Amino acid sequence: MKLAIAVLLAAAAAGCKPPPEGRHDFEPAAIERGRTVVAAAGCAACHAFPDIDWPKGRAGPDLTAFDGRGPIAGALPNTPANLAAFVRNAPVAKPGSTMPAMPISRSEARDVAAYLYGISDD
Amino acid sequence: MTDASTAFDAWWGWPPPVLDPAGPYAESVTVLAWALFAMGAIVTAIVAAALYVALAGPAKWKAKLGGEKLIWIMGVAFPGVVLTGLLVWGLTLTASLTDPIRGDEQRIRVTGHMWWWDVEYLDAAGRVVLRDANELHLPVGRPVVLELKSADVIHSFWVPNLSGKEDMIPGRTNLLKVQADKAGRYGGVCAEFCGGPHALMGFVVAAHDDADYRRFLGGERIGAPLLTEQQKVPGSLPALERRTAAGPVPAAANGGALFLANGCAACHRVEGTAANGLSGPDLTHVSRRLTLGAGVLPNNRGTLQGWITDSQAVKPGNRMPSYDMLSAQEVEAIAAWLDTPR
């Protein structure tokens, strides 16, 4: 029985990850631009990123292993458009979010989304 | 910042600011540094040549090299003349950077604190016109006399593009002249280890034309001019610009009351309110600053909230506690209130 539950849980956990063909591909240039925007806007004041050495803020969720899994901020369907909207204007994208609107343009927000999807722990 | 070269570029750009003077005082220091380097190179070359002659030269030259006359000339007279000349040059130059005030220069008092800078703009009579922190605004092309003081330990004020280094010593007022000949931004640091987050004690210098400078002193929000080359703000990347947030920003509502109720006013002053603390940076004009935490974060609503919530994660050991007991809505309201132009 225990084994059956474990197998079931493992299967469920594996199911959380989108299949490889469902993953998003972004141009490396967009990912790199996104990284620069993240550093320049100071996102690291609240979030930890794997490739930003300092600061590693603790006020917001740790994004070290952000891999495009699960709903965005626990509420929005995980799509690049939603993620871009959320990082630019969190209070509107998810009412009640404690993350403030950030001073970045729409195209910069798309780059940030590309960068975030590129953060991988596997 | 992924690697050392990116970090280096963000901090210093290239050429490093000590070799990239932007005004007459820094220029004189740079010339002296190159002269010292050149003299060192010449002396090294002479010694190497003499060594070669002593080991492998013709016997006649060897005899000359060991003679008393050469020792008097090259061993006593030459260093005596050269070193005395360089010493006089260096001392005169250092003294010229710290000349007493003549009366027509802009005067700014900068007081070093652990680990931030208190900045007071003075009028000709020495009265404080404007109080600010962690940022220095200068008029382009005019000499400015800085009165450097310290509130606690020894700090050292250094803007490599604009002038030499000058210590800030408790109980003393040291003078330093700076001048920027082109509008732009320059990075400054504390150059004397002052404990804890000393490495995160930086500031931005912005040099404006006269009209903008007057507007700054009048308390207006002005865009600081950008350098075309790398922007030298410690710890930040080139694209940094003070921009307003993309979305709706919450109203300041009860932010002022929360600021007072949570004890922020014990350390911070906000002109025109009951907040009158003096042990932390003056926050009256924080809404128009480029950075937060003494040059460590770009200043926007997000970083302001992050700093209030957990400044200890951003600048470990700084004297502001992390206000992580406040709710997100409270932090939002306080940040909105602070971010209001005054």
Image (cartoon, coloured by chain):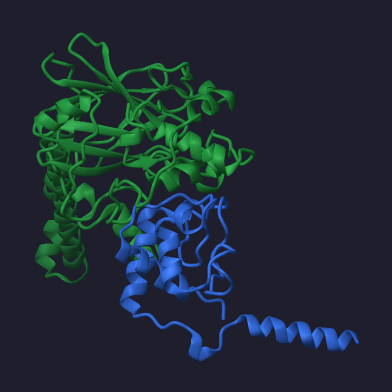
Q: Residue at x 40, y 28 (%)?
A: B283
Is B148 left or right of B255, judged from the image as shown? left
Q: Position of residue A43 (x, y in %)?
A: 44, 55
- The tally of labels here is 0
Q: Position of residue B120 (x, y in %)?
A: 30, 21
Q: Outermost residue, bottom direction?
A: A21
Q: Which chain is blue?
A: A
Q: Outermost residue, top direction?
A: B125
Give above or below for A82 relative to B183.
Answer: below
Question: Can you tell which quarter of the image residue B188 is in?
Answer: top left
Is A119 left or right of B95, judged from the image as shown? right
Colour that chain B carries in the picture: green
Q: Position of residue B33 (x, y in %)?
A: 18, 45
Give above or below for B323 relative to B9.
Answer: above
Q: Residue at x 32, y 18 (%)?
A: B173
Q: Residue at x 41, y 66 (%)?
A: A84
Q: Outermost residue, right direction?
A: A1
Q: Is residue B242 visible to us here? A: yes
Q: Is residue B72 visible to us here? A: no
Give above or below for A47 relative to A78.
Answer: above
Image quarter in which the N terminus of chain B is found: bottom left
Front-most of residues A32 and A52: A32
Image quarter in which the C terminus of chain B is found: top left
Front-most of residues B198 and B279: B279
